[in-house]
Amino acid sequence: MSLSHSTGYNNDTICAVATSPGMGAIAVIRISGPDSLPLLFNLFQPKNKNLSTDNIQSHHVYFGEIRNEEKVLDEVLATYFKAPHSYTGEDAVEISCHGSEYVQEQLIQLIIEKGGRMAQAGEFTLRAFLNGKMDLSQAEAVADLIASESGMAHRMAMSQMRGGFSDKIAELRQQLVQFASLMELELDFGEEDVEFADRSRFMELISTLIKELTLLKDSFKMGNVLKKGIPVAIIGKPNAGKSTLLNALLNEEKAIVSDIPGTTRDALEDTIVLEGYSFRFIDTAGLRESEDIVENLGIERTYDKIRQASLILYVCDISDVNRENTNEVLEEFKTYIQDENKHFIMVANKTDKLEEIPMNLKEMLELETVFVSAKRRENIHLLAETLVNHVKEQNFSESILVNNSRHYEALAKALESILQVETGFEQQVPTDLIAIDIRQALYHLGSITGEVTSDEILGNIFSKFCIGK
């Protein structure tokens, strides 16, 4: 790792506002680096006149004033974190000041005048990584935690930040390292034709690695969906009440509602959180034959959204449904219903217009069916419960879910290398060639946690963080 030496990240003292931009009751200014404490006492006058750099205690809060020469800028609370017991692993200070934007700007300017510099995006977390406070996947989880908007996204970020995913990768990598070292030893004694590594045990290990890596790689589809919101396509014929249903689910007038067929020309999206799960609802154009070019483009996009969605709500007007068109619907979406990665729910809408039980009720109940009146917002809670129950049935609460595309790519490449190793053994490829694939697998696994990385990768990851984190 050359980043800390080549860029001087650990040789200077950085500062930034750590709280959200704008005015609030309190703002926190974060300072980190070797000169944090002297810099603090250059601008902070504690109420306790006896306090100095020699007797200040780590993780204690001190009250005082920020002064620019004789001018008092603000009354603040200052907390000192002595290295290595800080977020970054180096000496750090946090100043809690009043939330005035003017105060924040003046305080940052004063810190810079006293020898600090403005932190780059993600530089505090980058220093934490460089100083061994967390590995790379845990550092990325910090950004996910900040961005989490649902309970599930929060849980996944917390699990990764606490090292659940890292521990699994470390375990797989360590198993491979132990055997790889024996194979490297064989190469050193190549002329003597000796085997230090038990080939049968190694094949068992390779089989286990293939299984574990495949599970982790395949979990990305669900992990990414849970992180960004489960896509739910609302589809159906024109005037079935799709837009009214969307408005009822969101509890706001998001979509235009009209009796004129073809009102919705493009997909409308919005997200709500139900019992900690984020659902991304997509209201689509009504499915029908049309001579309107713009409407047909919307219908084409509807089929694209169906392909992308994990859940499909087919909305039908129950007062206008019969055995024939119900079977037509089932046939039309047979492909999607049989796709094991999609779940199809029929929403029998407009129960407020229902005078008698339809003859085709039995056929409808063969599908998972929820009866609602979107107009009156009746039984919307039952539809919400159905959606949540479907997610809960997946039973992944204790599973490690990959939700980072960089991790997915590294896992895919590591799996590819391990499969090459398996093929090499089966075809009795020379040990030195098999060792190349093993090294590649180790490299890709190491790139996930940052055991092997580059300045370019780190720059790309941490540039996406907010300033102050």
Image (cartoon, rainbow, N blue to C red):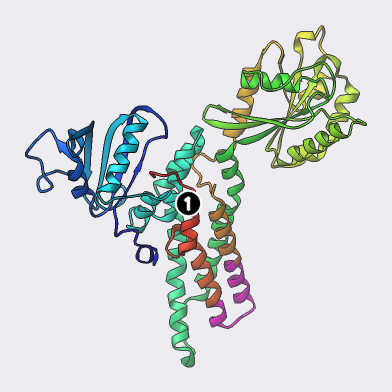
The stretch in magenta equals 417-434
Amino acid type, label 1: Ser
Task: Residue at 46% x, 92% y: name it.
Answer: 192
Observer able to see residue 249? yes
Horizontal side of 467 relative to 81 (left or right) equals: right
Horizontal side of 306 relative to 200 (left or right) equals: right
Task: Residue at 24% x, 48% y: name it.
Answer: 114
Along the line of sight, which residue is nearer the eye, 296 or 378? 296
Q: Which residue is mark 1?
A: 463
The correct choice, above or below, for 258 with respect to 203 in the image is above
Along the line of sight, which residue is nearer the eye, 269 or 14? 14
Task: Residue at 53% x, 67% y: name it.
Answer: 441
> Residue reaching furthest left?
50
Image quadrant assignment for residue 268: top right
Count of marks placed on residues: 1
The correct choice, above or below, for 110 with respect to 191 in the image is above
| Residue 428 shown in magenta | yes
